[in-house]
Image (tube, grey):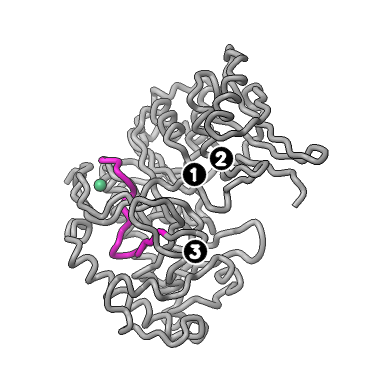
């Protein structure tokens, strides 16, 4: 069987009509409540609520939010459940401060991960005939293993390179005819750059699909990656707390990211008031898990900003709700001279200009009594130097920012091994 873009991994669940889908969600909400209430730490948090109190989706909104800090404070297993069933593995999310967040997986959780990842692959038009190169690391970070479990389900071949060793990645990609690359969103930029430096012909690759996520990547960056690697990309979401990548993915119709609603309940709330906002309005994504056993989440505040695009049936036939691509994190917001902005807004402006690279860094410093902002951006040889003034003018017009724009040579900005560092804030706190 060849799996095409319009095919689904579990059509009976992925295209379930809204009414039975919502009935299933309510049933699983109750089951999740019953599971966590068996743990004294959860029972204390939830203050006397009973599973039967949830009769409709809206009843869920009466439950308290779960925050990142609570999960950190619960290190290692303070809010974990299903200990009697036994854990089979653990994944970890490392924050910059405080305890890491651990997510212990039962055998059921590992199976659930494989299932949602298989759905994601199939939504991206990937099937058993594909050769999938998995470039996120296989370790405590959730990327590698999730992509692996999903690939096993659909019966595809895996090249488990893990992170780094970009020259070897390119070589294996070419010699083993990889058709799919999975990566954190800015890693394809490393591949493109390494190919250029080593005179590697990207046209010798057989790649056709990229499944990318774990970082904010603008539509402009996406277009660049697709053009240079001649691939079609799919935006996958998910985080350690929710069980890794696989919470959702956009489909070939590219009209929003499908969230697997029979596994995850998504709400979008006003970050200030915590109230659910109307569909279409931007807010913070709040996720509840409906089938996870080791670390169920009830109304977890992700800090990711998005909006509900639609709850109607998509052109691809799937009925699960669609979210807009994540537009950054509430905590990425920068306040500079009283103006709020997100790094993606700068990226969008930069990438409109020819000769300007996707490598940039915004540096914020204090300057006497004031503040100074410098945008360092790499350019290609022969780039028109007046582009700096044009970028400055556009940022002033669109965001009322007046940064200094410094063009620098290719390679001048440090490449970290993991996620890209877009903002360096040296201002005293
Ligand atoms: Zn769709």
Mark 2 sits near ligand 1, with its Cβ under 8 Å away: no
Q: Which residue is drawn at 27% across and 74% down?
A: 56
Q: Residue 273 got which mark?
A: 3
Please tell me in which quadrant of the rendered image residue 360 appears.
top right
* CB-based contact (under 8 Å), mark 2 and mark 1: yes
Q: Where is residue 425 in the image (x, y as percent from the top left)?
A: 69, 44
Mark 2, residue position: 343
Q: Nearer the viewer, mark 3 or mark 2?
A: 3
- Residue 298 screen position, x and y as percent: 43, 71
Could you say which is closer to the camera, residue 52 or residue 42?
52
Tell me the tag on residue 216: 1
Q: Is residue 196 visible?
A: yes
**Mark 2 and mark 1: Cα distance apart in space:** 9 Å
Q: Which mark is residue 38?
A: none
In this rendering, position of residue 124 left or right of residue 48: left
- Say if residue 151 shows up in the picture: no
Residue at the location (22% across, 55% down)?
Answer: 319
Q: Is residue 72 left or right of residue 366?
A: left
- Mark 1: give few (<14), some (14-19) or many (20+) Cα within 10 Å: many
Query: Which stretch is magenta?
Result: 253-268
Residue 101, position as x, y percentages in the image: 56, 65
The earlier-in-sequence mark between 3 and 2 is: 3
The residue under the point 44% across, 28% down is 224
In which quadrant of the rendered view does residue 294 lie? bottom left
Q: Is mark 3 on a helix, strand or loop?
A: loop
From the Cβ of disc 1, is ligand 1 less than 8 Å away? no
Q: Does residue 265 sit above or below 254 in this rendering?
A: below
- 3D distance between C-alphas at marks 1 and 3: 25 Å
Q: Earlier in the sequence, mark 1 or mark 3?
A: 1
């Amino acid at each position: 069987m060849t799996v095409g873009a319009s095919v689904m991994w579990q059509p009976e669940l992925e295209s379930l009509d809204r009414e039975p889908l919502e009935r299933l969600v309510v049933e699983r909400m109750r089951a999740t409540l019953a599971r966590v209430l068996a743990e004294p730490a959860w029972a204390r948090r939830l203050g006397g609520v009973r599973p039967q109190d949830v009769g409709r989706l809206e009843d869920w909104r009466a439950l308290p939010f779960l925050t990142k800090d609570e999960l950190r404070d619960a290190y290692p297993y303070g809010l974990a459940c299903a200990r009697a069933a036994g854990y089979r593995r653990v994944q970890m999310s490392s924050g910059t401060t405080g305890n890491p967040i651990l997510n212990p997986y039962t055998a059921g959780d590992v199976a659930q991960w494989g299932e949602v990842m298989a759905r994601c692959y199939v939504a991206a038009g990937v099937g058993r005939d594909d050769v999938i190169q998995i470039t996120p690391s296989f370790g405590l970070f959730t990327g590698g293993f999730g992509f692996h479990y999903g690939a096993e389900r659909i019966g595809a071949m895996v090249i488990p390179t893990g992170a780094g060793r970009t020259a070897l990645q390119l070589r294996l990609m070419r010699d083993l005819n990889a058709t799919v690359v999975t990566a954190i969103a800015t890693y394809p930029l490393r591949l493109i750059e390494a190919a250029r430096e080593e005179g590697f012909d990207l046209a010798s690759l057989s790649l056709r699909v990229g499944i990318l996520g774990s970082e904010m990547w603008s539509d402009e960056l996406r277009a660049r990656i697709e053009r240079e690697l001649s691939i079609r990309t799919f935006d996958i979401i998910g985080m350690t707390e929710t069980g890794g990548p696989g919470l959702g993915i956009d489909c070939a119709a590219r009209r929003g990211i499908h969230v697997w609603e029979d596994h995850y309940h998504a709400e979008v709330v006003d970050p200030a008031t915590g109230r659910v906002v109307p569909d279409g309005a931007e807010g913070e994504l709040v996720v509840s898990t409906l089938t996870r056993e080791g670390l169920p989440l009830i109304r977890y505040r992700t800090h990711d900003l998005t909006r509900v695009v639609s709850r109607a049936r998509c052109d691809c036939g799937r009925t699960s709700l669609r979210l807009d691509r994540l537009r950054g994190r509430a905590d990425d917001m920068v306040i500079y001279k009283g103006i709020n902005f997100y790094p993606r807004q700068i990226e969008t402006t930069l990438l409109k200009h020819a000769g300007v690279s996707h490598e940039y860094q915004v540096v914020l410093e204090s300057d006497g009594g004031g503040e100074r902002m410098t945008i360092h951006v790499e350019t290609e040889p022969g780039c028109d130097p007046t582009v700096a003034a044009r970028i400055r003018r556009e940022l002033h017009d669109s965001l009322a920012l007046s940064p200094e724009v410094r063009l620098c040579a290719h390679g001048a900005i440090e490449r970290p091994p993991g996620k890209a560092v877009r903002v360096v804030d040296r201002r005293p706190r």
